[in-house]
Image (cartoon, grey):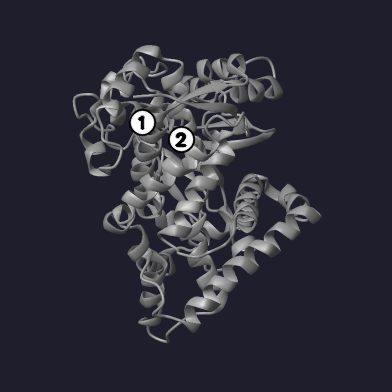
Amino acid sequence: MPEAAPAVAEIPFYREGGSDAESSRRLDADRPGFIVRAYRSAGPIFRTVVDGRSWVILAGLEANDFVWRHSDLWNYPIMFPAFGEQMGPDHLNVLEGEAHRHKRTVLKPAFDVAPAMRYLPQFNASFHAGLAAVSGRGPIDLVEFWAEAITIANTQTVAQVELGLEKLQRLVRWERELLPGIQMGDARHAYYARPEYVALRAEAMEIMGAMVDERLAHPDRHDDNFQRVLAERRDQPGGYPPRGHLIDDLYYILVAGIENTSRLINWVALHCFLSPGWYDRVVAEVDAWDGQDVMALAGMPVLKAVIMETQRLRPPAFFVPRHAARDFEFAGFHVPAGTDLLSANAAGHFLDEVYPDAMSFRPERFLDGSRFVPRSNGFFGGGMHICLGRNHTQFQTPVAVAQLLKYHRIAYRDEAGLRRAVASAQDLPTEIWGGLEARCP
C-alpha cells in the first residue's frame, strides 16, 4: 500500500525563543526577518504562532506561484467575512470563481491601464493645488492629507461629484476606519458596533447611494470611469443589479485603496528624506520636469527606482489569510480542507538570493530597467485576485511624489521616531505630522 500523506500536524513547527509568546513577540518586532529565518529553517510551508494562534504559513517564490495559480483552492467568503458584512455579497474580496471574474469584467472600464491613465493630468493639477493650499500653514497629518488629496482628485475625475469638503472628509475617515477591522477576526463585531463607526458608515453609504441614484436618473450627464462601469452593468443580461451592488462598484472607484496609496507615497517621501543621496538625485530629476507633462515622469529612472524599492521594502500586507476549500498537497505535505493558512506573499522581497542585501534600501537594483523578480512581488498580490487598483496606485504615486519634492520641503514633527520606523521593520504610524514649505526648483 502507498505510504499515507503527512498530516497537517506533521508540517514543521518553527519557534524562536523559549515560548510561543516570546516567538510571537519576535515575529511582531521583525516580521520579514522572522519569516526569512523560518523559511530557511523549515522550508516553504511551516507552522508558527501569530498573535497567539498557530497558523500554517506558505512562504517563498514557490509558495507564491502555488497560491496565485490555484485560486480555486481558497474559500474567499470565509477569508474576508468583514468585507461581505460591511459592503455586501457582491464585494470583490468575497467573490470566487465565475462571480469574481464577472465583477472584474464589470469594473474593467475603471481599472485597466488606459482608464487609470485617463485623468493623470487632472490628478497632477489637483495634487499641485492641494499641496500649495497646505504649504506654509503648519504641521498636517500627511497620511490623512494624501488620502483626502486622492479622493478629491477622484471626485474631479474618475467619479465626478460635488461633495463638499466636510462630506468628503467623512467618507475618507470611514474608509480609514473600515480597514483595521478587516483582519480582527471575531473582535471585528465589537469594533464595527462602535456608535461612531456606525454613524460614519451610514453617512458613507448615504453619500455613495445618492451618487448612484443621481447617475441612474441622469445617465448622460457624466462621461467618467464610474459612468462607464454603469454602462457595462446596464448592458449585462438582466440590466442593472440591486442598488447595493452599484454602491460597491462606486466604492472601488472612489475610495478603495486610498489608505494604501497614501502610505506608499509617505514611505517614498520618508525614504528619500532619510537617504540624502537619493533625495538629491530624485530632486534633480523632478526639477528638470516642467511640472505639467505627466508622461515625462515615465522617463525618470531614479524616481521609478526609488518607488519600486520602497514597494519592495514596505508591502502593505505581509500576510494574506487563506482558507483551504479542499485538501491539497504542497512541498510534500498534505493540507486538509478547512485549514486556515497565511500566505507570506511578501517574503520573497526579503530573500538575499532574490534581492542581494535584501533588508537594505538600495534603489540602484532597479536603475537599469530591472523589474521585480518573477513570483516575488507580493505588493499587490497575484493571480486572478491581484489587487484591482494596482494601475491607479502605480500611476498616481510618481505624480504625487514628483509634485511634493519639486515644489516643497517637509519638516517632520517626530523625525527621530520616523527614523526608527524606517531603520526597522515597523509599519508607519497611523498619523505622520509634518509641515510643508515651498522650495524654488
- Which one is nearer the viewer's eye here, 188 or 163? 163
- Where is residue 192 drawn, in percent x and y? 73, 54
- Which one is nearer the viewer's eye here, 131 or 328? 131
- Where is residue 125 drawn, in percent x and y? 38, 46
Q: In the image, 218: left or right of 31?
A: left
Q: Which numbered disc flags the more N-terminal residue, 1 or 2? A: 2
Q: Secondary structure at mark 1?
A: helix
- The answer to whether residue 343 of the structure is visible from this angle is no
Give the residue number, with chain letter if any, for mark 1: 307
Residue 223, compared with residue 112, is above or below; it is below
Q: Secondary structure at mark 2?
A: helix
- Amino acid tagged 1: Ile
Residue 235, compared with residue 340, is above or below; it is below
**Are dots 1 and 2 in contact, CB under 8 Å?**
yes
Mark carried by residue 264? 2
Residue 221, compared with residue 184, is above or below; it is below
- Where is residue 370 drawn, in percent x and y? 22, 29
Structural crowding at the residue carrying mark 2, measured as other residues with C-alpha within 10 Å and reported as few (<14), some (14–19) or many (≥20): many
